[in-house]
Image (cartoon, rainbow, N blue to C red):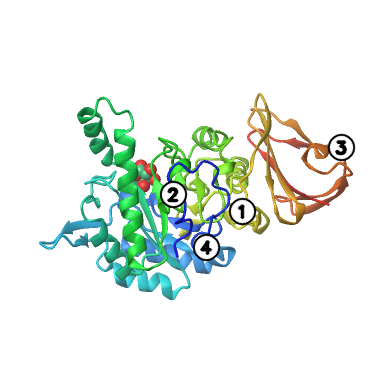
Amino acid sequence: MRVLAAFAFGCVVCSLPLSGQVTVAAKPPMGWNSWNHFAGHVTDADVRSAADSLVSTGMRDAGYVYVNVDDTWEGKRDAQGVLHTNEKFPDMKALGDYIHSKGLKFGIYSSPGAKTCAKYEGSLGHEAQDAKSYAEWGVDYLKYDLCSFQDNMRQAEKEHPDDPSAAKNLMIAAYKKMGDALKATGRPIVYSLCQYGVDQPWKWGPGLGANAWRTTDDIDDSYGRMITIGFSQAGLSKYAGPGHWNDPDMLEIGNGKMTEDEYKTHMSLWVLLASPLLAGNDLTKMSEADKNILMNKEAIAIDQDELGRQGDRLYESGDLDVWTKPLSSGRVAVGLFNRSWSTRDVSVDLGEIGFKSGGSVRDVWTHADLGKRSGRFTSRIPKHGVTLIVVSK
Ligand code: GLA
């Protein structure tokens, strides 16, 4: 059974499934997506070598199992309306088989609109047919990107000037249509909405069987954009939980335009947010620093923690920010962030986060036990850097 099928539209606090066992995206999905590095140039060969690299680098064993082909794989529809691939992807079933043969899972991309964002063929009017093709190809994950459906929404606004919800309702119906089509295939497929956070998808996504929804517009490989997105997630934690996750977009770690401290900030924030972790770099060319960030097992364990709770802001003061995420066994992960241009001390009061008699502190980036601490815990943090700790009783 698809998770959360029992949710009704308008569900506000969706932190627990109402019925059934969470079987799809019980934890935030982890893997790789082609867009951030390859964009419209991605080919079958690139995806196969990404799959190979997930295995050879140890990424797969660290949890990164989805291999997701983003936009620009689509070809033309035939006379029966069946969508074929373009010349960059000669055989999707064979690609899916290859990915599965490596112990990985296969993801694909489409749009509820007539066209995708890169102006390839979308699924409008062909939802059931496309879902059937995905299932035949062995697809395990669909990213469904609003794109040209915004034209249909504008049209609905024009046609129903007295109904402020007309466009939104049309969009929700379009997302539901594909959600139902995926369910009808009988194949467990992670359903990930890409809708840029417009119209609060965290409120209606779970009701139509979505397992994740983008909360923002696109990320890029810059510190400014990454922190704008990451730190704007405050207040959303109550909408995430097993089977349904907020998605602040894919990772840029390894794409080369941020410093090591900035990429550590990126990873720390995303794991505190219980975000899907979809690497977006060229996995065939990873530096040791990239590998150490993406495959820091202690950081990944924060993201994937059994409790399935998203973290949130504890306090912010100018360029200094403290976020916490409740973990299983009464532990708490804390991110101390310095967004300023100079080294600064950042503190958290351990009493305030449940450790009145003190707690044992583990530093996730240095892999060091910092011993039993109580009262204020202070860390000296370089510009754009982070200290990520786990506190336990
Ligand atoms: C949108 C999405 C991106 C990517 C592109 C592909 O911009 O937000 O993540 O999928 O489309 O065209």
Question: Of tags 1 and 4, which is closer to the observer?
Answer: 4
- Residue at the spot of label 2: 207
Residue 88: name its quadrant: bottom left
Mark toward the start of the polypeptide (3 vs 4)? 4
Crowd class of label 4 (few under 14; some 14 to 19; many from 20; radius 10 Å)? few
The answer to whether the beta carbon of the residue marked 3 is less than 8 Å from any atom of ligand 1 is no
Give the residue type that dot 2 points to: Gly
Residue at figure coordinates x 60%, y 44% from the top left? 260
Give the residue type that dot 3 points to: Gly
- Contact? badges 2 and 1 (CB < 8 Å): no
Mark toward the start of the polypeptide (1 vs 3)? 1
What is the spatial separation of the Cα atoms under label 2 and label 1, in whole angstroms? 19 Å
What is the spatial separation of the Cα atoms under label 2 and label 3, in whole angstroms? 43 Å
- Under tag 3, what secondary structure? loop
Crowd class of label 2 (few under 14; some 14 to 19; many from 20; radius 10 Å)? many
- Contact? badges 1 and 3 (CB < 8 Å): no
Mark toward the start of the polypeptide (2 vs 3)? 2
- What numbered label is drawn on residue 20? 4
Q: Is residue 352 above or below residue 307?
A: above
Picture coordinates of residue 258, whole percent (x, y): 54, 40
- Under tag 2, what secondary structure? helix
The answer to whether the beta carbon of the residue marked 1 is less than 8 Å from any atom of ligand 1 is no
Residue at figure coordinates x 32%, y 63% from the top left? 44
Give the residue type that dot 1 points to: Gly
- Contact? badges 1 and 4 (CB < 8 Å): no
- Residue at the spot of label 3: 375
Q: Answer whether residue 156 is visible to the viewer in this image.
A: yes
- Residue at the spot of label 1: 308
Mark toward the start of the polypeptide (2 vs 1)? 2
